[in-house]
Image (cartoon, rainbow, N blue to C red):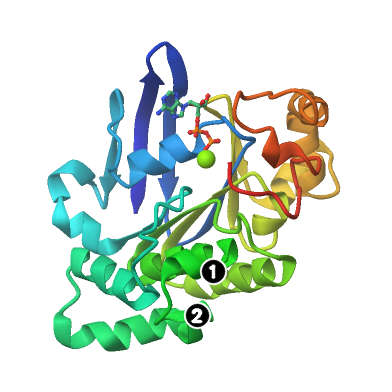
Amino acid sequence: MLEIKNVSKTYGKKQALTDISLTFTEGVYGLLGPNGAGKSTLMNIITDNLSADTGQVCWNGEEIKALKADYRKLLGYAPQQQGLYETFTGRHFLSYMGTLKGIATKDMAAEIDRVADYVNLTYKLECAIGAYSGGMKQRLLIAQAMMGDPRLIILDEPTAGLDPKERVRIREKIRELSEGRIIIVATHVVSDIQSIAREIIILKAGQVTARDTVAALCEQYGGEDLEAVYMHLFSQAASQSEACLTTDVEGKDTAACGGGCPGDEEAKDD
Ligand code: ADP
Ligand code: MG
């Protein structure tokens, strides 16, 4: 069980997260919110790549900071940014990430083959990452997050840059992986998660505004699907994102809004 207890985070004067408390047990959770809502900040705190100003993250009752390497072993993380090693081959990158995770040398080749096959990249393993498309890089990130069979998998915007066929493929893989695991998928794309998440957590300006099943959210907000709920909750943000064809709303997201996000099927990395 993963517990987030009263977590807050500021960057200078910017309050990115305010008093977040959440509990996760087995299954897929969708962390949904527009760009700038604080999703990546929360994912970075859960994965211990960033420290909260206040509050705690606990795994089975123990603070993750005390678990150290034991926590790394049970965690798989695909960050939003593709900070990949362009000159590494896919195999070299997976081997490097596997070593960091503590996978034994004797098990490495089989583990690389397993995760590469899972994301349909076996044929690319000997190529330099610099020659991968954006979608291939995204799949490689997901592959490394799966190494070592982690109990907790954090995927931050996992379908950014993927074509529609690949998006569906990744979504089904996430669904398959969820048995016996906690998977948290942060996204601003409703269709990525509405059919696979047991619960949706809606983050707005650094606060949890709603948390429930898709059906319960639809009932509560009177929408026919999750997209309607999202539009209801973010009607102001939605009109802003239409405006951001010409205006840079978050100071960084102009390109992502070119097709009319949120819900833009072809949304690129932010
Ligand atoms: P999301 O992933 O939902 O798009 P983020 O967690 O990336 O949101 O950002 C939340 C807020 O914090 C945004 O206003 C963003 O501009 C700000 N922010 C994120 N990272 C930093 C940083 N390193 N320094 C300053 N501000 C940041
Ligand atoms: Mg983000």
Q: Residue furthest top?
A: 13
Residue, disc 2? 121
> SS for tag 2?
loop
Query: Residue drawn at (76%, 48%), measured in percent from left and top?
Result: 264
- Quarter occupied by the C terminus: top right
Specify the amino acid type for callout 1: Met
**Number of numbered discs overlaid on the protein picture:** 2
Nearer the observer, 270 or 73: 270
Quadrant position of residue 48: top left
- Asked if disc 1 and disc 2 are in contact, CB closer than 8 Å, the reply is yes
Graded by Cα atoms within 10 Å as few (under 14), some (14 to 19) or many (20 or more), the crowding at tag 2 reads: some
Residue 174, position as x, y percentages in the image: 54, 68
Residue, disc 1? 136
* Real-space CA distance between mark 1 and mark 2, rounded to the nearest whole angstrom: 7 Å
Specify the amino acid type for callout 2: Leu
> SS for tag 1?
helix
Reply above or below: 154 against 54. below
Residue 232, position as x, y percentages in the image: 80, 32
Residue 89, position as x, y percentages in the image: 36, 73
